[in-house]
Image: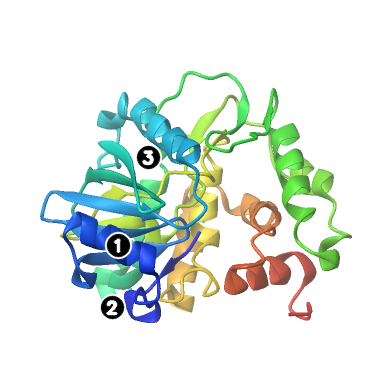
Amino acid sequence: MGSVDNDAVSIEDDAPLLQVMSHLGIDKDALLGIGGEACVFALGEDRIARVHHPGAARETVARRAQLLDDLHRSAGAVPFSIPRVLEITEAHGRVLTIEPRLAGRPLLHVLGEVAGAERDNLLVRFLDASTRLCALRLDHAWYGDLCEAEPIRASCHRSYLEQRARKSLACAGSAFAGVDPARLAAALPEPVGPSFVHLDLFPGNVLVEDQEVSAVIDFGGPCVLGDARLEPLSAVCYLTPFITPTATARDRRLAREWLEGQHLGALLEPAERWLAARWSFARDDVSLHRWCQRVLLGPAAPP
């Protein structure tokens, strides 16, 4: 999860990345953004290159490409674009993918520029998009991880939720030792059947153009087959300033009102607690980890 503003990250000291850029015939002006998995560069108007960070395995990248291929069979069911991998290659020790360039700018950045009715409309469009992703269909009957190297999968959703939370909490640090993953899972309902859930749908992974959501990006490790209700619930939870610093308290109030209109308000707190447990392993993401601590351990949790 998360994205980093271009100005906050220097690529000058990354010699292999600079070699890859030279190989592609681009300079730092082509940098579109840096996320948790890759640096993304424009290759003209029509394509991008995702240069994965050191240590990324080609097999991991191939699983993402296969997931996107599978999802594209039903991509016409959603009113926005999703990525697709055209080519997987390697250069100077880095795995990279070539993909179509999707229209729009990250909502995360746009929220830093707009106000009033325009802002409210964009926020509602973002939230509405969270209810549409379940139209992407996959032919599996289980619940669980879609892109993990060692996926957790289960025949019932609560079993998956418990196992996933337990695995993350085991890496979260001793402060989380008292968090009971079974209780977190039991607080959420069992769905009728499995649906595709992006589970990383925060404003940095949504592109907007002309007051509409134009694309959803960064399908990968967090993606699961789960309860479709987790998508809008997580989208609202991720508007916390720990994850979306350009979101405001007014945005969060609007989002909660929208969630009530979806008859999901009662599930917000248990969903937030499970999501915090799910992300609690990410100790290298300081802001995200602080959110996990705050949600699960309270405001007075140690840093």
Q: Residue, x 80% and y 48% (percent of image)? A: 181
Circle 3 — which element?
Answer: loop
Are discs 3 and 2 less than 8 Å apart at CB? no
**Quadrant that contains the C terminus:** bottom right
Q: Foreground residue, 189 or 185? A: 185
Nearest-to-viewer mark from 1 and 2? 1
* Apparent side of residue 177 relative to residue 87 in the rendered image (left or right): right
Q: Residue, x 48% and y 47% (percent of image)? A: 262
* Residue 171 picture location, percent across and down: 76, 56
Q: Foreground residue, 287 or 122? A: 287
C-alpha gap between disc 3 and disc 2: 25 Å
Relative to 115, say whether 82 is above or below.
Answer: above
* Residue 81 picture location, percent across and down: 25, 42
Task: Assess disc 3: are there few (<14), some (14-19) or many (≥20) residues with their C-alpha within 10 Å of its C-alpha.
Answer: some
* Residue 164 picture location, percent across and down: 71, 43
* Residue at mark 2: 115
* Residue at mark 3: 132
Q: Residue 19 carries which label?
A: 1
**Three-letter residue code for mark 2:** Ala
